[in-house]
Amino acid sequence: MNNLLLERLLTSSLADAKFLLEKHNEFYPFANTIRDNGEESIESIYTEEHPNLHDSIKSLKSILFEKISKGEICAFSIIYIMKLAYPVRYKNLDAITMDTILNDKSCNKFVYPYKIKHDKIIYYKPFGMKLSDIFETLER
């Protein structure tokens, strides 16, 4: 069940991020959530014209962690853009980044490197990592 949930979350999150990236060449952090009944939604917070990336991500994680703890949602993914410093072959590329948390407390980070060249987006091989502790995810 959780593999299917994770796959569904990643598929919809990546599609939304690519749509925004291709339309605007950037986007503010947002989240995709899934309820137990299968209903999906997109959530974001708007605090100011040009919000601080770290603060936006931390606020979203805090709100969504509370919702998953209360059983209001069974999974979420926070999607944002970050500049890569590693692995070396991707250094200085931007990446669509997704922090995912499922109701079983499994945490993952998925990274989809890309560059924009001549108004075209070129995607590179994605990679991911399992985060050992949900609180580690909240602090990032």
Image: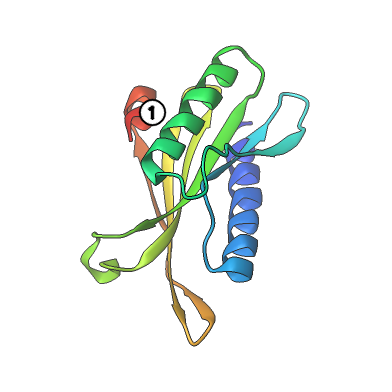
Comparing 63 with 40, the one in front is 63
Q: Position of residue 42 (x, y in %)?
A: 67, 40
Residue depicted at 39% across the width and 25% down the height? 134
**Rendered view: 100 above or below 92:** above
**Rendered view: 137 above or below 93:** above
Residue depicted at 60% across the width and 70% down the height? 22
Q: Position of residue 79 (x, y in %)?
A: 51, 47
- SS for tag 1? helix
Pointer 1 residue: 138
Which amino acid type is shown beneath numbered disc 1? Leu
Q: Residue furthest bottom?
A: 118
Q: Quadrant of the C terminus?
A: top left
* Relative to 49, 89 lies left or right: left
Comparing 87 with 56, the one in front is 56
Q: Quadrant of the N terminus?
A: top right
Q: Residue furthest top?
A: 70
Place residue 67 in its image quadrant.
top right
Q: Position of residue 94 (x, y in %)?
A: 38, 64
Q: Residue furthest left?
A: 88
Comparing 100 with 120, the one in front is 120
Comparing 15 with 45, the one in front is 45
